[in-house]
Image (cartoon, grey):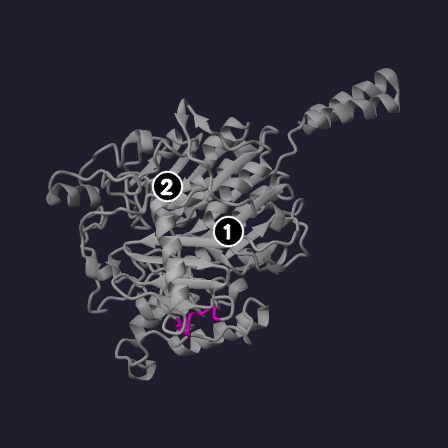
Amino acid sequence: MKKRITGYMVMICLCFACTSFIKAQTGAINKRKDQRPNIIIILADDLGFSDPGCYGGEINTPNLNYLAANGMRFRNFYNTSRCCPSRASLLTGMYNHNAGIGEMTEDRHLPGYRGHITDSVVTIAEVLKAAGYHTAMSGKWHVSNTVVQSTPEEQLKWLDHQSYHPLFSPVEQYPVNRGFEKYFGNIWGVVDYFDPFSLVSGTTAIKEVPKNYYHTDAINDTAVAYIKELSKDDKPFFLYVAETAPHWPLMAPEEEIEKYKNTYTKGWDYIREERFKRMCALGLIDSNKTKLSARWNDSLQWANNPDTAWDAMAMAVHAAMVTRMDEGIGRIIAALKECGRLDNTLIVFLSDNGASAENAAAYGPGFDRPAETRDGNTIHYATKKDIMPGPETTYSSIGPRWANVANTPFQYWKEESFEGGIHTPFIAFWPNGIKQPKGSIVQPVCHIMDLMPTCIELAQTKYPSTYNGRTIKPEQGLSLVPVLEGKAGKGHEELCNEHYGARYIRYNGWKLVVRRDEAWHLYHIDEDATELHDLAAQYPDKVKELESMWNDWAMKNNVLPKK
């Protein structure tokens, strides 16, 4: 476009030698050029609140640190506590039950639990594509019903790449049928990072991957290719980069793991306390109001831990996976610079939930977990911590103690409605649009469903009441544009959640929260961010008030009744 404009202006100069006429023509061209920003959403998977360096972590994340130092960080950003519900909420601007995914991807034939994004909502891609944006996605989809084979034996053959079936979910639920022009990634959730299952380009299953394939690299390199392709014209683009890192299994290239081989040998308490100190120094935590919660199940001390070598390596692999993701984000930033698109691109980075306490080894093979590699090597599920994590031939995870560290200073983890599950990093970067001072840390209470209205406002379009002849539910998120512009605001006065019985309501400085099959806990969350002082017995009327509000929310948002 620049060459065409330059040539045109030279021709005008030669023919007419009239400066005022040139200015008039240039102004007309600028009016025709679409000035709306590009939007890139980068979603990490199971990343803890304090994992990135810019949130207090010791993990090397120079590119996330660059985005934070030249953009802004949020103190109070919330998700829906698990991967597919958070993805549904992000993509639709709705509480996840209203989008159809109250739990995972199984269809329970209840409105809030269909296991896929339903036709009563729209995705960001659908709305922005209709508004004239290019749309593309790379990475983890995980918001469609999973297809499984008729027998466990055939399912394992499929997972082990020994049989071929072309569809991993109903094709009408694939990203390219929900507004994305281009898509490369995994339709399901769990992947072997060196040879992923459910890998798709458009709607075509990919049968083989190249030698030395690593999925995090492929996701980010595909995003780079999309940026270069979509920058060839003047239309703005929306790009959704859905990372799988650092979700288990713990797998990373050896050279990346080597960087962290000695980092975690001092153990859980040391790393957690050092992270907390850095968070306070960065201004992310007010140490007068926020105290470091007790480490989970601290009856086992690092000095008495018989598995220190294995546990230190597990967290080293986790860190390596985060760093490898950060390196890919660096290539995305470089591509935007190369294409002249960086200044007018909003990049947001967030996580779908807190770090995971799951014991991946205990699951064993089945459903989405293979028994063998493609070439027939047995995959070891390290229940006894007898094989070091990192290579393709073993499935393992960091476990609850390291998850507790990753989610510093909070308690608990993914799946729970305590802060460790729902309170995660959020970085926004946009040189042309953010009016806050560089490196700002902002306070408003925001939610993953706020990305839809933010994108709509920036795209200068409207949320539809109908789409392709279907009635669409009203959006529920709040635009983050006022926050980006430096305007005062508290964000959401009320937020709620439910996932497998874990639930909470946050309202007017209070939080009522429960793990499944427990009694309610009450916290003055504005003064007790790490949920240390349960006030339920002291304020029974407040418990009743908030429980009633949560029940009203549940009835209105397809959470209740449940079977």
The residue shown at (31%, 42%) is 112
Residues packed near mark 1 inside 10 Å, few (<14), some (14 to 19) or many (20 plus): many
Q: Earlier in the sequence, mark 2 or mark 1?
A: 2
Tag 1 residue: 349
Magenta stretch encompasses residue 335: no
Q: Magenta region, mostly helix, strand or loop?
A: loop
Residue 523 in view: yes
Closest to the camera, between mark 2 and mark 1, is 2
Q: Is residue 305 left or right of residue 549?
A: left
Q: Helix, strand or loop at disc 2?
A: helix
Three-letter amino acid code of the residue under disc 1: Phe
Q: Nearer the viewer, residue 227 or 80?
A: 80
Residue at 53 percent across and 37 percent down: it is 227
* Residue shown at 58% from the left, 44% from the top: 346
> Marks 2 and 1, Cα distance to the nearest angstrom?
24 Å
Q: Is residue 532 magenta?
A: yes
Percent coordinates x, y for residue 257 in the rendering: 39, 63
Q: Nearer the viewer, residue 327 or 446?
A: 446
Q: Quarter holding the N terminus? A: top right
* Residue underneath mark 2: 98
Cβ–Cβ below 8 Å for labels 2 and 1? no
Percent x, y of residue 453: 52, 40
Residue 45 in sight here: no
Q: Which residues are magenta?
A: 528-535
